[in-house]
Amino acid sequence: MDKRIACHCCDLLHEVRPLPPGGVALCARCGAILYRYKRNPLDRTLALALTGLILFIVANSFPFLAIEKAGLTRQMTLATGIFELYREEVYLVAALVGLTTVLLPLVELCALLYVFAPLRLGRRPRLLAPVWRVMARVRAWSMMEVFMLGILVSLVKLASMATIVPGVAVYAFGALIIVLTAAFAAIDPHLVWEALENR
Amino acid sequence: MSETTEQPQATEVVVRRRRLPSLIWIIPIVAAVIAAWLAVKAVNDRGPVITIRFDSATGLEAGKTKIRYRDVDIGLVEAVRLDEDLTHVLVSARMDRRAAPFLVDDTQLWVVRARVAAGEVSGLGTLFSGAYIALAPGRGKTPAGHFIGLETPPALTGDQPGRKFILKTKRLGSLDVGSPVYHRQIQVGRVISYHLSDTSEEIELGIFIEAPHHERVRTGTRFWNADGFDFALDANGLRVDSESLLTIVSGGIAFASPDPTKAGEIAGENSQFILHPNRRASMEPVHQLKQRYLLYFNESVRGLAPGAPVEFRGIRVGQVVSVELEFDTDKMEFRIPVVVEIEPERIRLTGDGKLYPEDLAPKLIEKGLTAQLKQANLLTGQLAIALSLEAKGSRPTPGKNDPYPRIPTIPTPFEELAGTVTRILKKIDDLPLDRIASGVERDLASLDHTLKAATGTLESFDSTLSGLKELTGNLDRELAPAAKTAIEEMQRTLKELRANFGSDSPLSSDARQALEEFSKAARGIRDLTDYLERHPESLLRGKKGTAP
Amino acid sequence: MSPTAKEAGLAACHVCNRLIPVSELAATGHRCPRCGASVHLRKSDSLARCWALVLAATIFYFPANLLPMTHTGFLGKVQSDTIMSGVLYFFASGSWPIALVIFIASVFVPLLKLLVLAYLLISVQRRSHWRPAERTRLYRMTEIIGRWSMVDIYVVTILVALVKLGALANIEAGPAAPYFALVVVLTMFAAMAFDPRLIWDRMGDEGN
């Protein structure tokens, strides 16, 4: 296997060398992160992806937020927002929100499980290459953490007007963001590349 | 030394596979446990789904309309769809688990919208929130899943303590479901239903009296229709009754027990009562025994109307039922049959008890009872019927077609009436009206004078006040504060006095107006007496210009 | 200094970092032999694509900021809010941290992104030598913060879904919402289309 790596930012070629625990390899010229030290990568990635899937189900099936005002209450789930936008014929926004907060995170989770469950069991998933490619593309468009910020801003916006009660799903959603980030951080791409090489 | 030293053999390490899975797996396990617990809880909290049938789905929205009991949400409408035969709307709703015990066969559900009816405005909140379905739990024990929704809010919900009664009446008036029932002008219940009785002759009203007031309904309690003002202009003069201003608009029922000592026992559920047309009618003692008699008059009965009292020595013993006009084609003459109702129970009987009330009237007729028209109210011209034993009349000859036994009548001597009138006229004539009127005028002038004098006095009060003010200035420094407040008090009183008696003050202008009014009336009386002196007959026949 | 991959005659796969000799690229159909992703020495048409997307985003930036983002009905009174009027409302009502967050995420960041990308494009085209490391860092920053502009879209989504209280209070999405979404998406695509290696390439051309 090629022991060299090109910086994705400035194209400088580097020799790959082993890292100490917790270490990070940076580009010598532009400072971009090239690779990190990974500990127990397969178990971590897989466990966190599984946790993520459970949290995803909870976040999407339980009430997200509830508003109370003058004895009136209204609950929403994640899907309610997308549905209301769709009903108001703001299709582009509805589609964008649906993709970035529900569909693409789900794709990411499924891709993680599809890639790492077989790898953990010492097998190579059949569609490893295309799934891996899709996952790399999707990452930039999964914006759950931005959505979380949106929730916080909405809470402050509505706090003076009505009482907002966060539901179980909000907590699940917050945990999902952390877990998914941790899952991606735990990935050691070299393992995947090795698996791709050994076909 | 052996040969083995020349080529040292490296032993391969024993590789042991990890026995326990990595600790990281605790995270998904914890997540799974929490998710499972949430799921189980959610499933457990899900109550039953019920369906409700309504005539229309106005204001009902799937996923939005709530079902509420005492303003607490206990369910949510999940779907609104048409019945198979397209005549009704079926609403299915997911209920809370807590609501499950309420869902019995006699539970009532209705749609709450903004509503203005029967003297109350309800559901204003729904203008903002949209309609909701209200629930009143029933008392039944059988669980149910299908309900027929009510189109109007029920006047009576099953969980309210109290008692139902039935009132019978001939006319509904302005009463409606929801009309209030008053006791001593406090609302204690309401009308919950009305329908024609089986014979269609009466209306049966269902009323509900809330606990603890239902115990005030005794067997001897009287109910009356309290719709609005009760005007009555009769031989007894004008009377006005009104239970509550609200009943003028929406109608209402009131009840009371005429004689608390004879109120009787507490009335049971669904006891029947008569709804009297007004308070007075309800308060009259009920006389079961009513005997009808026929009276024939030949003179004018102008002023005699059904309901007019029948009196014996000035005490009421019955009333006139009908007044008609008959023409006898054989004799070619008019006569006026008057049917009266005598209530013999009004007369207390003393003696050995051999005579029963029902035999009293025939006995008296035998002894020469006669009937006669009598002025009951000089001003209104109402007539009454006076019975007497003194005047001797001819014995009645029972007619062949008389529906009732007859009481002989004796004509009212015109002189008697006229005599009365002349006597009255003479009295009026004798009144020193001129002097009264001029006296009133004099009084007015002197009052005016007094008022002026009062104003003068007030002016002098005013100067006194300023003097006092000066004095208080002095006192301020010299006297104790207590004395000062006393003087200030006095000052205030004086000011008020001035305000009340000053020439423009309300009190004095009121008095002046009243006096003017009075002098106008006095002038009117003088005009009247002048007219009567010239046309005494107008007292009997009315003023010429207006007489028919 | 060691050579770049290009100088060594190698192209790096963007997905799996595999180095492929440029001479073999044509033979593999510009596909990575390891993961199958398309491989080019540099992102194809980077400058033109990036310019096109930046210009499109700039055009949409105006309706996104001038048209109302939400229509708020409160007790029968309808009020339309643009992004800026929302910021001013929060600033006036004293919650300036929120005002700042919305301002930075919704107004400042998209504008900054457009300006930064335009600057990077111009600097690459002018073969600037000025501080390539800093310019690369600037590019990485725009790529990271760009997604946070979506926050206003999400706020609108949540408000629209939650505030549906009949006549009491009702919020609907305004016409600016799709334009704003387009600005965010287009600037993200623009940032992706830009190839930061060009910053160093052009410099190398001149330097040698």
Image: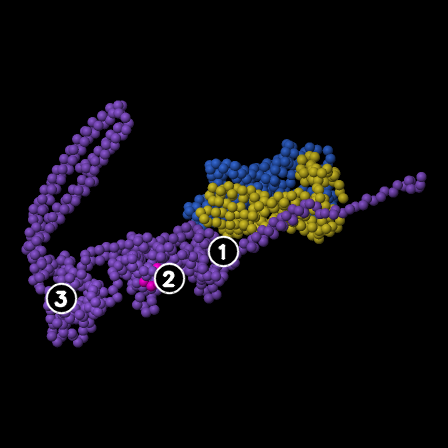
Chain colours: A yellow, B purple, C blue
Instruction: Tally the marks.
Output: 3
> Is B470 situated left or right of A96 in this image?
left
| Picture quadrant where residue A20 is located | top right
Q: Name the amino acid type tagged 2.
A: Glu
Residue at 48%, 57% in the rendered image: B102
Main secondary structure along the magenta-highlighted residues: loop
Residue B1 horizontal side relative to residue C117, left or right: right
Q: Which residues are magenta?
A: B266-273
Q: In this rendered view, identify the residue nearer to me: B530 or A130.
A: B530
Gap between marks 3 and 1 measured at Cα: 77 Å
Q: Is residue A17 above or below residue A167?
A: above
Q: Which residue: 11% across, 40% down?
A: B445
Quadrant containing the C terminus of chain B is bottom left
Q: Which mark is residue B480?
A: none
Mark 3 closeness class: few <14, some 14–19, many ≥20 residues within 10 Å:
some
Q: Quadrant of the N terminus of chain B?
A: top right
Would you say residue B110 is visible in this rendering? no
Q: Are marks 2 and 3 on the same chain?
A: yes
> Dot 2 corresponds to which residue?
B269
Circle 3: element type: loop
- Counting residues from the start of the chain, the first of labels 2 and 3 encountered is 2
Find residue B482 and report its horizontal and vertical position in percent.
28, 29
Quickly name the residue at label 1: B99
**Residue at the location (11% across, 74% down)?**
B332
Name the side, left or right, on which B313 lies relative to B86: left
Q: Is residue B128 magenta?
A: no
| Image mark for residue B389 | 3
For image coordinates 16% across by 35% down, the residue present is B455
Q: Amino acid at mark 1?
A: Ala
Q: Are marks 2 and 3 in contact (CB under 8 Å)?
A: no
Q: Residues within 10 Å of mark 1 (few under 14, many from 20)?
A: some
Q: Position of residue A52 (x, y in %)?
A: 63, 48
